Amino acid sequence: DAGVIQSPRHEVTEMGQEVTLRCKPISGHNSLFWYRQTMMRGLELLIYFNNNVPIDDSGMPEDRFSAKMPNASFSTLKIQPSEPRDSAVYFCASIRDRSNTEAFFGQGTRLTVV
Amino acid sequence: GENVEQHPSTLSVQEGDSAVIKCTYSDSASNYFPWYKQELGKGPQLIIDIRSNVGEKKDQRIAVTLNKTAKHFSLHITETQPEDSAVYFCAASRSGGGADGLTFGKGTHLIIQP
């Protein structure tokens, strides 16, 4: 298996623009997580899905952030409009199920908002 | 919510010596404690985990100890090697396995001096 696949690896955008980050979880995994990593705050859970349904989005910092999972093999995290303080590395992770919960992380998307 | 504190933020040890990283957590209901290793430009990778019904777990050169009464857990790496250089994160979860996401410590940058 190729593991969790995220795209793009790097994104540079101007303040005010819409940004969409993409994630393909490991096939057969039924939960997907979005994390954000910054120097100041470390790794923070933003939102997670179970069987494509959003379960907890309490970590989403503002209404500018939204996430979807239209099917078991694809999820997006969107920021609209983007701001410089959104600059961070965004990770997607997946787990097989509630009894086998090793989280597998993607390589991350480094977002820079200028 | 859960709060995980991790120390030290940077640890430099001579190759062949042992390294110890310590974490404390605040939520007494937390019952799953994984450790992740993150290499430059990559996502975190699980190296060992422990559940609350166990006080210690070992896997070759890596061991983790848990003290539920004091709410702290530690990672021990013996006979350190250059490839152990990385950032290590502890985490905690109350869902019995991380199925509801993880709360991470801020990370420890481990440097193995040749």
Image: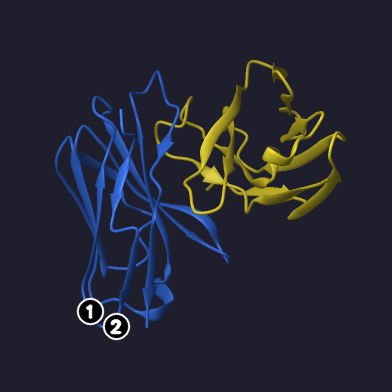
Single out the residue that lies furthest toward the front.
B114
Q: Quadrant of residue B85?
A: top right
Q: Colour of chain A?
A: blue
Picture coordinates of residue A9, whole percent (x, y)? 34, 58
Identified by mark 2, the residue type is Glu
Q: Residues within 10 Å of mark 1 (few under 14, many from 20)?
A: few
Q: Colour of chain B?
A: yellow
Identified by mark 1, the residue type is Gln
Picture coordinates of residue B89, whole percent (x, y)? 61, 44
Do the residues under discs 2 and 1 have CB atoms within 8 angstroms?
yes
Question: Does B99 sit above or below residue A32?
Answer: above
Picture coordinates of residue A54, whole percent (x, y)? 24, 44
| Residue that carries the numbered disc 2 in the rendered image | A14
> Foreground residue, A52 or B18?
B18
Residue at left 57%, top 65%?
A39
> Foreground residue, B17 or A14?
B17
Does residue A17 appear left or right of residue B67 in this picture?
A: left
| Residue that carries the numbered disc 1 in the rendered image | A17
